[in-house]
Amino acid sequence: MSGYRLASGGRIDRDRRLEFTFNGRPMAGYAGDTLASALIANGVDIVARSFKYRRPRGIVAAGAEEPNAILQLGCGARTRPVQRATQTELHYGLSARTVNGWPSAETDLTAVLDRASRLLPAGFYYKTFKWPASGWKHYEHVIRAGAGLGYAPDDADADRYDRINAHCDVLVVGAGPAGLSAALAAGYSGARVILADEGSEFGGSLLSAAEHIDGAPSTHWIARVRAELAAMPEVTLLPRATVFGYYDHNFLTLVERLTDHLPATDAIGPRERLWRLRAKQVVIATGAIERPLVFGNNDRPGVMLASAVSSYVNRYGVAPGRRAVVFANNDNGYRSALDMQRAGIDVAGVVDVRTDPSGAWHEAARAAGLRVFAGHVVPDARGRRRLASVRTARLSADAGRIEDEGPRLDCDLLAVSGGWSPVVHLQSQSGARPRFDTDRACFVPGDPVQAERSAGAARGTWDTAGCLLEGNEAGVAAASACGFEAPATVLPSAAAADEQPLLPCWLVPGFKPVSRGPKQFVDYQNDTTAADLHLAIRENYTAIEHVKRYTALGFGTDQGKLGNINGMGIVAEKLGRPLAEVGTTTFRPAYTPVTFGAIAGRDVGALLDATRHTPMHAWHVARGAVFENVGQWKRARYYPRPGETMQQAVDRECLATHHAVGVLDYSTLGKIDIHGPDAVTLLERVYTNNWRKLAVGRCRYGLMLDEDGMVMDDGVTARLAEHHYLMTTTTGGAANVMARLERWLQTEWTDLEVHLTSVTDHWATVSVAGPYSRDLVGELCADVDLSAEAMPFMSIRECTAVGVAARVARVSFTGELSFEISVPAAHGQRLWEAVMAAGERYGATPYGTEAMHVLRAEKGFVIVGQDTDGSVTPDDLGMAGLVSTKKDFIGRRSLARPHLQRGDRRQLVGLLTDEPAAVLPEGAQLVDVPDGPLPLPMVGWVTSSYASARVGRSIALALVDGGRDRIGQRVFAPLADGRVLAARITEPVFLDAPGRRPHDRTDRNAERPDRRPERPPAGAVDA
Amino acid sequence: MLQLECPWCGPRDEEEFTYGGEAHITRPPEPDAVSDAAWGDYLFFHTNTRGLQSEQWCHSHGCRRWFNVARDTVTYRIHRVYRMGEPRPGFDA
Ligand SMILES: [Zn+2]
């Protein structure tokens, strides 16, 4: 219990007390607190157990870089994992839990791992992955169970998320002194500006500092600028908005948190809004993150960044400890010490790595009576659950080792500062490579590759006056690049650079060698120590990217915001190479974790994808149809009667079609209207067969190949007029075929005069099949002669149906006599109802796609995409007769390639199981010998398989190696359940096969002989 | 996400477009006159340029027109957008 609330100060509202719970314990804070500042005020020391060693961890930072205070917030469907307490605004009723440690982080019984740490060296994961291979499954559940960073809600997300697409001239990222100054300058110019900041309040680092601008507290200036910006019509202010991704061509993504800061009762509307933003110019004013120092036991609760200490004291009015020591290699340590002293915290001393500190800050500290240990370090921190004291030591003249031990200082708070790292994450994401600045000992933005510029601490400028100036210049330049001129302004006066240079200190020398001394943590979140990095180098991992992967440095949810640069410094030192040569680190989106909800937005549930319904969908629903998805379409699969199984329903639908008449909704079939004098030339070039002699009013089946010679799509195309054709495609292939045809016409055959229109949705089509189909269709289309003489197979006529212009075509995909009636889509439901009403006396039965599949398989008609997979040629399907030798077409040349000429290619055959009732599973693999040594050589697979009512047994289609020469032979299908089904290879046709030449399947879509009985069988009538 | 300038519609986001691969690969006018190897090259082998490349794009969720883009495959900088049938630009610009 070290932290406490200061009696006064801070930007909190002490009149608004907010109750919350932490691990179930009731606590209270104030409006303006973060969860982290409230936890400190309530004396909470331990907020996590570390990832690998289960060591107690406390709050280290006050912003996005926090590695330890990663909590689970809320409960039930609204619970949120991986939330940084330092960026969580406190609200009434907030409930927070620690996520690792058992039974809790504060009393963790697994902490014994710390003492067994020699069993968990660097590369532990690599080594368990590598050897023994069987070991990982034993370690994995232990490690995973212990390593939780939170849990996803069990229930569906109860919240709504929005998405917005936006454009602007200038995006300013970060509303600290540089960002505000940039936004103001760009705003004055009249440019369209968006200013986004991850915090709830604008001001950035100024909110945490005791600084003055224009002679008044800086918060006055912030308020004035904010009001001025808010009054500009072209400026959009986005607080609580994190710019987390910078992509190509100045496309950036922001997540705006809308309700997380509110109690549940006030959280109305979307929870988060994802901004997809295209900015002409970007100003990156993202500030800098302070680096910790790497020394023994530097992870003890009570060790905190100096800047965070200042934040808690100045902004939140809390003291993170009662007696403090400062350990720094730069002047920020003095700033923090003075902040603490002003707040009444006992400061036991400032340990400054520099031998001879000087300058304004050092003098101010001396003048304030602070004890300074120059040329000293803290090699070790003591205390178990909370820091109790630090050991100090004097450095050698070269700062490379410890000369002798200094005084031991009792303290429960150690404010550390190892210098600053500009937040170059977004600039790095934009494609630029950060550059190491040796003087300032930090990575600074590299040469821009996109339209962006950095300003302020984000480019290594630490003083407020410099930030205001750079921000202004960046804002003016960005606006100017967009064609807006910013008027000259007088910059406010602020503290100018008065800091002395820092002394880089990547690894603090210890009393013992690195490998034997206390752990010196580099990456808190992954428990990566300096010894781990040294071990990686000893094991010859010398490239920084390898070292990072071997030691997991920077692989936590914080992406190594605190540890990466120190880690690279330690590696560089150990390798004896300059840090700039060791390389840089690549930052990737997201800057801080983003919820899946924000990314998904409204595209969830029914809105995930479009659903397409045919015009008669409502009828199918009312009739209790079971639907299947075909692409985006909902197609009726079968229409079960009460008590019927799927197989019983499909059998009934097949037999009704066979004996009487079946009615199918065929509206989903792809339809492309082709107009123009070169229409037939297009057909000639994309279909394998000949089209020049197709007469007006006639239809033809066509096979379409990809240029590699493989079957791509098929369908029937009708010639409606001299230069007017209607092409049909498979339901699933419609968009693809349309796109291919358009591409050929626009890129290769630009001389063809032909126009394509997708008319799939324009027409509703009802297919009527069976011996009574002519009678039934004749009643609906009275103005057309449907007789066999007047309307032969494969012909099309214009007519009238249900009072509107219609088309009727005599084509067949079932083998039965069939007519397809098409009317404009708006009349589809009426047409369907009219067909069913007129069909009552013929026993008209609606049938779905499943019966259609069975009926066509009995005739051996393939479905492209089911019986083919992009590696099947026309000859493989036994359809070589459809391939013209007299013209060129897409794919023809490829068919002549030797591989496609081989006789042992996989070919379409039929399969009849030895056991007639056994139905082979579709996809089943086929072998010649069922019980040979494993693996068994595979000779093909089943593509379609059904129990066929018309044939009276099971049937299947399959692709089998050299299958056509193997008719009559047996193959075996070993199944997953251990059974082996034997089957005989047959011709791929199970009805009306006699009389045809083997392998000649050019009569595809042929009708069966007319066998209309005198009256429909009573049993087939659909009630 | 790239921003492409459709010659008919103006600048639009990449997600409105379909990528069509390398441009200026003409289908051999007489396929029978080329060897199997040359036909295989036409079908399967593209230059896979590192640097400035001419490529085809289609504004598939817009005007559905195909056009050419000269784009640097390393920096993603768009150097020129030009219509079908226009010659490949000299890449000095
Ligand atoms: Zn367009």
Image (spheres, coloured by chain):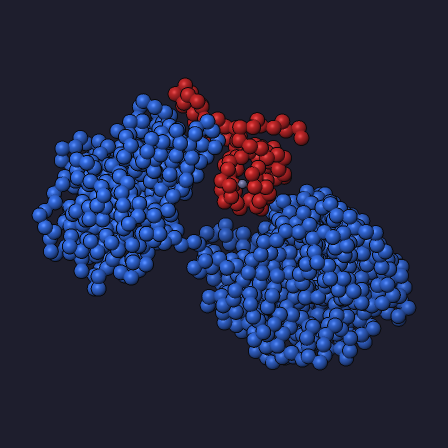
Residue A108 image position (x, y, % from top left): 57, 72
User: Image quadrant for the N terminus of chain A?
Assistant: bottom right
Q: Which residue sits furthest top? A: B33
Q: Which residue sits furthest left? A: A1014
Residue A389 image position (x, y, % from top left): 74, 71
Can residue A326 be seen in this snapshot? no
Can residue A1000 be seen in this snapshot? yes
Residue A20 occupies quadrant: bottom right
What colour has chain A? blue
Horizontal placement of A285 versus A598: left or right? right
- Front position in the image: A367 or A510: A367
Q: Which chain is red?
A: B
Residue B90 occupies quadrant: top right
Q: Quadrant of ligand 1?
A: top right
Horizontal placement of A1014 versus A786: left or right? left
- Front position in the image: A751 or A40: A751
Residue A742 image position (x, y, % from top left): 44, 36
Q: Residue at x 51, y 43 (%)?
A: B62
User: Image quadrant for the C terminus of chain A?
Assistant: bottom left
- Say if A885 sits above or below A507 in the image: above
Q: Residue at x 43, y 25 (%)?
A: B39
Number of labels in the image equals 0
Q: Residue at x 83, y 68 (%)?
A: A217
- Say if A207 sits above or below A759 in the image: below
Q: Residue at x 17, y 35 (%)?
A: A789
- Front position in the image: A685 or A232: A232
Residue A1017 image position (x, y, % from top left): 11, 53
- Say if A415 sits above or below A420 in the image: below
Horizontal placement of A501 versus A870: left or right? right
- Front position in the image: A763 or A995: A763
- Say if A934 sits above or below A2 in the image: above
